[in-house]
Amino acid sequence: MMTQYAQARRGTITGAMRRVAQRENLPVETIRDEVAAGRLVIPANRLHLAGCQATGTALDPCGIGRAATTKINANIGASPLASDLQHEVRKLCWAVRWGADAVMDLSTGGDLAATRQAILDAATVPIGTVPIYAMIARPDGSVRAIEDLTAAEMLAEIERQARQGVDFMTIHAGILREHLDAAAGRTMGIVSRGGSLLAQWMAHHGRQNPLYELFDDISAIFAEYDVTYSLGDGLRPGCLADASDDAQFAELDVLGELVGRARDAGVQVMVEGPGHVPFDQIEMNMKRQEACCGGAPFYVLGPIVTDAFPGYDHITSCIGATAAAFHGASFLCYVTPAEHLGLPTAEDVKAGCIAYRIAAHAADVARRLPGARDWDDRISRARAAFDWEGVFAEAFDGDTARAVKAATAPAHEDHCTMCGRDWCAVRISRDLAARRRQAPAGDK
Amino acid sequence: MMTQYAQARRGTITGAMRRVAQRENLPVETIRDEVAAGRLVIPANRLHLAGCQATGTALDPCGIGRAATTKINANIGASPLASDLQHEVRKLCWAVRWGADAVMDLSTGGDLAATRQAILDAATVPIGTVPIYAMIARPDGSVRAIEDLTAAEMLAEIERQARQGVDFMTIHAGILREHLDAAAGRTMGIVSRGGSLLAQWMAHHGRQNPLYELFDDISAIFAEYDVTYSLGDGLRPGCLADASDDAQFAELDVLGELVGRARDAGVQVMVEGPGHVPFDQIEMNMKRQEACCGGAPFYVLGPIVTDAFPGYDHITSCIGATAAAFHGASFLCYVTPAEHLGLPTAEDVKAGCIAYRIAAHAADVARRLPGARDWDDRISRARAAFDWEGVFAEAFDGDTARAVKAATAPAHEDHCTMCGRDWCAVRISRDLAARRRQAPAGDK
């Protein structure tokens, strides 16, 4: 009944570590040592790892950390306006189809526990939640006043979700009373839902953040089920103007303290980060988190690098996500085109997932992870050989590539692009290279 | 009859410099000094600057260089498959509508001279061309063998286009005979159309690149009309595997030499760059160009940071473009979702322009250009105030933002996002801040 972290600390290699090593093409000792150092987490609730007897589905363990490839998360969840259990399971499958390595169920409507269970029973990817939502969402769609929540109720909900098999939970334990003054002067204030609810609780009671005070109790629950902490950044900046401010970094210091306490309790831990950050501040943010948080994996939301393009925030944020993953983040929470505006459609989810697969892979190539560029090279060789079927087969979204190609002209065997045969640089270049090979050396 | 460069060198302030200073909100002396140093170009053919008597339209001068905001270029042009003069003028207007600062007419079909003239007569933005295309494209859609071209014909076409008012021309004068061996060993070979045609000419004749040999003659034409060189990178890498290779950098050294020769002839000059570059090599590429090319503005195509997502290369490339503009590029040539696959549709042109406006602006914010972030801050303040009309008015594509918002719920005055009123962090945060302001200091 020990966590992956506790076992790694004792030198034990687990089945989950072996599977992660296989998926990452790394020695299992590397995985174990990275888990033991806290630089890699394997969010794997022991119940989800054991699997669901009814569906026959179990978690396929996934490693998150700098030694591994960069991972991406997609958010799903029912809202009071639209809740349908099977619809959420379909969203899970859709997000995984488009490359999500993990999925968070952020439901705030419908039967939250039943939805969560249905998702867990169907998921081979790690499932995360923000349990404070379920603490206040009522079945009828109304919302309970956060102030009325007691410590016992908070712990009970966290334990209920752990017992369901949730692999990682966002716990906003780092936003403290003493941070609220700094946040009040911001352009956007507090944009994290969990953070704002806890601020409301603290303001009402005039007391410290209850999740901070309950931290060791939560850790005890997490240790029992091997739930991984995702330490929420309740004070993440919500616009460029608020990036890298005192509020953000004051909370980050607390998150660093909590990383140490989580590890002392034998619990796996990662840390959540911004949000909205100008491109030039991303490297600094990544390095600061690494230093503050003892190398705990950084789980970032974007970050968005400009606020001026609502409707296109999958793009504004995947730029920041690429830089973040290059400079230190291990886990990228996707942002869809609907961010800041409305509920994402299926197409928005697909667009968000693809933008983040681009960011994750581009960063892995740039980090020179062994083998990362092989995929690019295969597709480039297919393109150079006018092997269109090879291009479509290797492309992340081959169907879209095929459709765009077909709209202009059929795939040809002797030229490659929109230019047409006469203008095809690749064809001309190939012909020249072939002639050079045939010509006697002195005749070039 | 002097170029902007020659006048700046003599200390003269021109009307074009004054207009650029106004548009950039910079002192006109700064513009003059940057032009004189060759770090900023104002592509402004004196005929385009004078304007078209028939349409009453003239060039609105645009500055390209590190002292100015980052600029973006959109490519249009008729192909042998689809040529329609008025259609190209509509494409020009559409690209400018979506933020193109400059447009290149890359036509290879139809009546090229007439199309070019129609575009120039309608354009307030600088217009660029790649004149080698018109040297070989025949009116019937067939293509003349590049080998048959004489030096006199090449110069005649360049002069014809200068006399039409073209503001900048891509001249692939840097790809030399001695580079062809290095290029032959590449995964993708030569992917520049102009580069591949000149390689074919050199291979056939066993002689040096004619545009290199004619460089001083071309400069004399450019000096007369004040056409700005866009020194083409015929050996730009066409995939990650070929990035930063010997062929690319050998050509870059020649481009650096040609920058000096262009300046000696009193001609404005910028330099074209890659293409496909892993994210970690972008900064090095920018710094190397700056050092090689005496600070001449760098005009890059993307670069694309992964080859594995055909159909999404507006995204793969705008990631690279942001990093490029942050680290040294001044001018970003857009890439559309159709790149590598087919001819871009109007929606593709829009998607490419928007992705590149994002890249240019994100980089300008990151470079901390004075006032660059004001736009982001205005939209953030509108968002914080639940001023949805303000958000839509400030957003780059407010119609899309409005449509996404409307698909979920009407705009409300007391909450901001997809979460609904009860879950709106911004509302909760605002209420808290208001209460803190009302409460006596000791009561917080």
Image: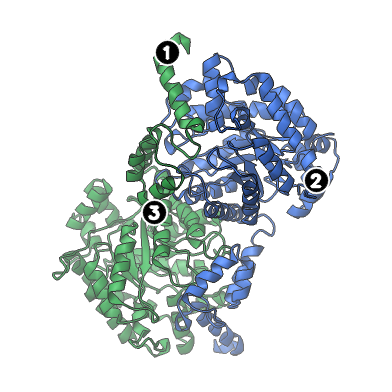
Chain colours: A blue, B green
Front residue of this view, candidates B185 and A335: A335
Residue occupying image coordinates x 50% and y 22%: A180
Q: Nearer the viewer, mark 2 or mark 3?
A: 2
User: Quick one: label 1 or label 3, which is nearer the N terminus?
Assistant: 3
- On the image, the x and y values in percent for residue B373 come to 37, 41
State left or right for residue A363 relative to residue A39. left
Q: Which mark is residue B144?
A: none
Chain of the residue where label 1 is placed in the rendered structure: B
Residue B300 in view here: yes
Chain of the residue where label 2 is placed in the rendered structure: A
Front residue of this view, candidates B26 and A297: A297
Residue position marked by numbered label 2 in the rendering: A16
Asked if A138 appears above or below B33 in the picture, the reply is: above
- On the image, the x and y values in percent for residue B236 come to 49, 68
Q: Which mark is residue B439?
A: 1
Front residue of this view, candidates A207 and A242: A207
- Name the amino acid, label 1: Ala
Mark 1 is surrounded, within 10 Å at the Cα level, by few (under 14), some (14 to 19) or many (20 or more) other residues, namely few
Residue occupying image coordinates x 41% and y 86%: B146
Mark 3 and mark 1 in contact (Cβ < 8 Å)?
Answer: no
Chain of the residue where label 3 is placed in the rendered structure: B
- Where disc 1 sits, the SS reads loop
- Where disc 2 sits, the SS reads helix
Residue occupying image coordinates x 75% and y 28%: A221
Residue position marked by numbered label 3 in the rendering: B357
Q: Nearer the viewer, mark 2 or mark 1?
A: 1
